[in-house]
């Protein structure tokens, strides 16, 4: 039972780290576009 809980915890941690990594990737991907968009608006 304790092992199941620890497995669940590691799964949750890996999901969180994966989500933060994806968000960083998306930030890098959309950063140039947002800069272009802001310069077009200005």
Image: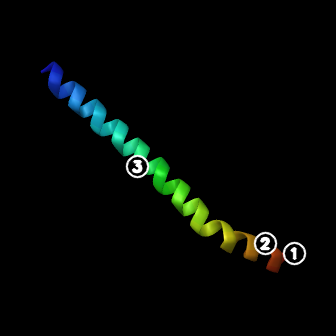
Residue 38 - label = 2
Task: Determine contact: label 3, label 1, CB under 8 Å.
Answer: no
Q: Quadrant of the C terminus?
A: bottom right
Q: Position of residue 37 (x, y in %)?
A: 74, 76
Q: Secondary structure at mark 1?
A: loop
Quadrant for residue 5, please give it: top left
Dot 3: within a 10 Å radius of its alpha carbon, few (fewer than 14), some, or many (20 or more) residues?
A: few
Look at mark 3 in the image and give the residue it sits on.
18
Look at mark 1 in the image and give the residue it sits on.
42
Of labels 3 and 1, the one closer to you = 3
How many numbered marks are there?
3
Q: Nearer the viewer, residue 5 or 28?
A: 28
Please report the residue visible at 35 percent of the width from the left and 41 percent of the height from the top: 14
Please determine whether, in this image, residue 25 is positioned above or below residue 2: below
Q: Position of residue 13 (x, y in %)?
A: 36, 36
The extreme right residue here reads: 42
Quadrant for residue 36, please give it: bottom right
Q: Earlier in the sequence, mark 3 or mark 1?
A: 3
Quadrant for residue 10, please give it: top left
The extreme top residue here reads: 2
Q: Earlier in the sequence, mark 3 or mark 2?
A: 3
Q: Quadrant of the N terminus?
A: top left
Q: Position of residue 2 (x, y in %)?
A: 17, 19
Question: In the picture provided, is 25 more to the left or to the right than 40?
Answer: left
Residue 3 - label = none
Question: In the picture provided, is 34 more to the left or to the right than 42?
Answer: left
């Amino acid at each position: 039972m304790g092992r199941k809980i620890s497995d669940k915890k590691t799964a949750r941690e890996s999901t969180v780290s994966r989500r933060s990594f994806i968000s960083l990737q998306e930030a890098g991907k959309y950063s140039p576009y947002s800069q272009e968009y802001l310069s077009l608006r200005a």
